[in-house]
Image (cartoon, rainbow, N blue to C red):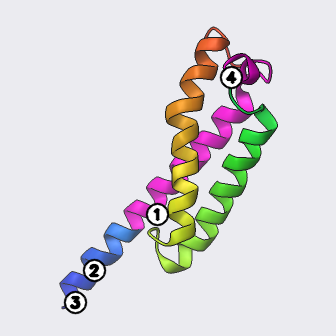
């Protein structure tokens, strides 16, 4: 039984830190994109996406630390960050010509 508990702990640890890395990547990427590229890509404004990634990442990280990365709030935050990374980021990057500042 001890082996199963250890495997469970390590899986949670890897998932948690992987999610924290995704949250951080989304926040840094959003902060470094041009503000004018967001409306040009027909997306929410840069401050809105920055707030979504910061609040989602912060809540997901804080609440995921004690109760595991698969709690409800962490999963909602992960979905919000993945929407940014998979939908908004490519569109904004294309609208800005690939430049960040």
Residue 88 image position (x, y, % from top left): 59, 30
Up the image or down, 2 lies above or below 19; here it is below
- Assess whether residue 91 is covered by the magenta stretch: no
The residue at 27%/80% (across/down) is 6
Seen as rendered, the residue at the extreme bottom is 1
The residue at 67%/47% (across/down) is 53
Q: Which residue is mark 2?
A: 6
Dominant secondary structure, magenta: helix
Which of pointers 1 and 3 indicates the residue nearer the eye?
1
The residue at 79%/18% (across/down) is 36
| Chain-order first, disc 2 or disc 1 | 2
The residue at 68%/34% (across/down) is 30
Which label number is shown at residue 16?
1
Up the image or down, 61 lies above or below 50; here it is below
Which label number is shown at residue 42?
4
What's the distance in space between the residues labelled 1 and 3, CA to CA? 21 Å
Q: Which residue is mark 3?
A: 2
Which of pointers 3 and 4 indicates the residue nearer the eye?
4
């Amino acid at each position: 039984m001890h082996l199963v508990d250890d495997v469970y702990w390590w899986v949670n640890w890897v998932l948690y830190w992987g999610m924290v890395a995704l949250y951080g990547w989304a926040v840094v990427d959003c902060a470094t994109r041009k503000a004018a590229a967001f409306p040009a890509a027909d997306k929410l404004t840069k401050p809105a996406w920055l707030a979504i990634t910061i609040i989602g990442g912060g809540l997901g990280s804080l609440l995921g630390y004690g109760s595991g990365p698969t709690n409800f709030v962490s999963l909602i935050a992960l979905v919000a960050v993945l929407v940014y990374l998979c939908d908004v980021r490519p569109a904004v990057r294309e609208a800005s010509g690939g430049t960040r500042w």
